[in-house]
Image (spheres, rainbow, N blue to C red):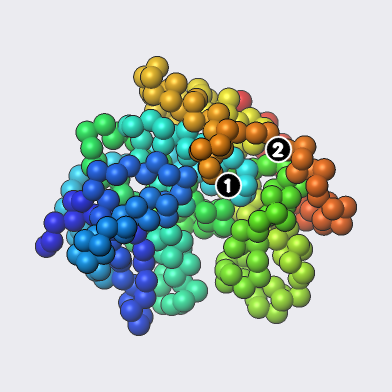
Amino acid sequence: MKDFSGWTPMRIYWRGPEPMVDWGHLGARRFVEPFFAQTMEQCVRHPADLLFRHQTPLSQLGEIAGSQPSMRPAGFIFHMSRCGSTLISQMLAAAPQNIVLSEPGPIDTVLRACFREPRISADQAGQWLQWLVAIWAWRRNPEAQNVFLKFDCWHALFLPLIQRAFPGVPWIFVYREPVEVMASHLKQRGGQMIPGVLEPGVFGWDLRMAASMNINEYGARVLARVCAAALAQSGNGKLVNYRQLPAVVWPALLEYWHVDYSAEETARMLGAAQQNAKNPKLPFAPDSQTKRDSTPADVRALTEYWLGDVFQQLEAQRLAHGLA
């Protein structure tokens, strides 16, 4: 077997009915960019990295994953979208002992594989997830101790599958005032908010039902489905409101994840909270009021109709069993 020690799965693609893994040369790089894809872009800039990179069948990933010791994930981050989850992942990434995987594309390909190939069972997808995370969790430098994974927002709908694949890994669901989330998507819509980008079956709909909604209704109902899925499983995790950030990270969230840091690492994480999470070159600027003020009345009404109840239920559950 080839030596994959400097390499990491960066993309899954299909060769006929068989899923294939495209590998990027990670080397000594850490996952410090806001998103997994941004780190992977660094791995394909050099011509040699492109020329010699590996492609393997996904079915071989188990053997490769077992070729090196791997760390167990310390915590998972699920979220409503545009609600501070990237802030949490960037705070964690500021500490050298953390490996932080923020919305890796291969995870999404695996979770949605059944929509392309119905023969792929939930158990098979769960095994593939275990193999991928095991390789990403190789201890590539001596400082690494903890592994965290932030999922895409719609992955909350796959929580039962993910929990079966990783039993006992503590997870959180981050959410925000729905009008503020909708306002963010009105300015720049995420793919999940646009009909046709994701299979409507992800949200339990068929094509006709998805086509019957206008774009704002579709987006509001997507967010409602994500929040309802997290609420249904919330007895197994913890809920975090955007308004609790960044204070809830230290110490409540770190204690929940059973991780500890030196004073220097804590200072780095708290320093990261002062920057714009998605563009760390810019300082953080509060925008909640601006988002609320900029939302048209019809979108506010639509948001309240579809998300008002589930938001209140999330709040009640958080106050009863979430993080203080």
- The residue labelled by disc 2 is 287
Foreground: disc 1 or disc 2: 2
The single residue placed furthest to the top in the displayed view is 263
Q: In the figure, 97 relative to 6: above or below?
A: above
Residue sitting at 43 percent across and 44 percent down? 33
In the displayed image of the protein, which residue is found farthest to the bottom?
Answer: 16
Numbered disc total:
2
> How much space separates mark 1 and mark 2, taking CA atoms?
19 Å
Q: Which residue is mark 1?
A: 79
SS of the residue under disc 2: loop
Q: Amino acid at mark 1?
A: His
Q: Is residue 11 above or below residue 293?
A: below
The residue nearer to you, when weighing 225 against 105, is 105
Q: How far from the left and from the top, in percent, is residue 277?
A: 54, 39
Residue under the image location 56 percent in, 53 percent down: 153
Task: Quadrant for the N terminus, please.
Answer: bottom left
Residue at x-position 31% and y-position 49%: 136
Task: Report the amino acid beneath label 2.
Answer: Asp
Picture quarter containing residue 98?
top left
